Amino acid sequence: MKQLIFAANWKMHLGPDGARAFLTAFLEGHRRLPDREVWFFPSAVALEAVVSLTRGHPDIRVGVQNVYWEPKGAFTGELGIPMAREGGAEASLVGHSERRHIFGETDAETGNKVRALLEHELIPMLCVGEKIDEREAGETLAVVERQLGVLQQHDAAALAKVVIAYEPVWAIGTGKTATPSDASQVHAFIRGWFADRGVAPQDARILYGGSVKPANIQALVSDAEIDGVLVGGASLDPGAWSEIVGTKLD
Ligand code: PEP
């Protein structure tokens, strides 16, 4: 059975009170389904609230949105991986397009974060995806391949722990979604990249992200290449999020 991941990226929304209110509403109707996990990436200040309220739900995992690669020290404003782990995080987003394009995060920095997360046994969810001009220039696969290059140094066992989120930048927060077949082609390319490095196709976990909502979720997750979704806007509404995570496959 295909195992799906439904991941919520709350970005810079929902502090501890907002997170508690969201989860109280969401968990009331939440039923565990055997073919899926639900992941939350709250703000760092809401991590504790989300971890404690979701304890006892084995299908729910919690991560952070960003980490620094040094374990501790004089790095004002940064979040160390051991601290995130101590706070209950099991994963971290890495290379989200807002980190790359608003904060100027480079591939080298993204690679440092992936390496440090693997060293500390947290799951990196590496986000990759092209900008609209790159897509129009036919460079989508070249961009994705360059961004995957930060994983080059890792062996198959380490690579199998990494989750990829393919998020075309032009689809994030814009209401435009890649068609399942567009996304599927890029996912197949990424799966091939992993297979070339010894990761069995069924062990690669490749999510789609970009304006996912209740109206388009079913077609996306019913595609054999799409192992789940990373969702921003629609994950902030408990009703919409419940519909998304409860989607029946075609
Ligand atoms: C995201 O932030 O990862 C994202 C996909 O956002 P949205 O769902 O709002 O497009």
Image (spheres, rainbow, N blue to C red):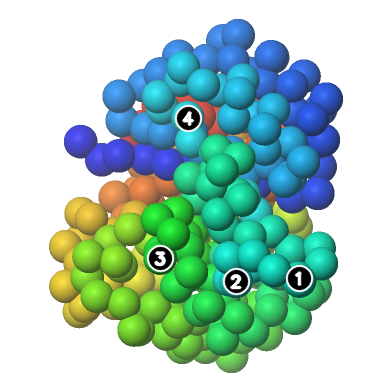
Q: Are marks 2 and 1 in contact (CB under 8 Å)?
A: yes
**Reading the chain from its start, which is encountered first: label 3 or label 4?**
4
Which residue position holds label 2?
70
The local crowd at label 4, few if under 14, some if 14 to 19, many if 20 or more residues have their Cα within 10 Å, is: some
Q: Residue furthest top?
A: 28
Note whether ligand 1 is within 8 Å of mark 3. no
Q: Which kind of residue does numbered mark 2 sit on?
A: Glu
| Horizontal side, residue 57 vs residue 191: left or right | right
Q: Nearer the viewer, mark 3 or mark 4?
A: 3
Q: Quadrant of residue 49?
A: top right
Which residue position holds label 1?
75
**Reading the chain from its start, which is encountered first: label 4 or label 1?**
4
Which residue position holds label 4?
60
Q: Which kind of residue does numbered mark 3 sit on?
A: Glu
Residue drawn 60% across and 40% down? 87
Q: Which kind of residue does numbered mark 4 sit on?
A: Ile
Does residue 29 lie above or below 20 as drawn? above
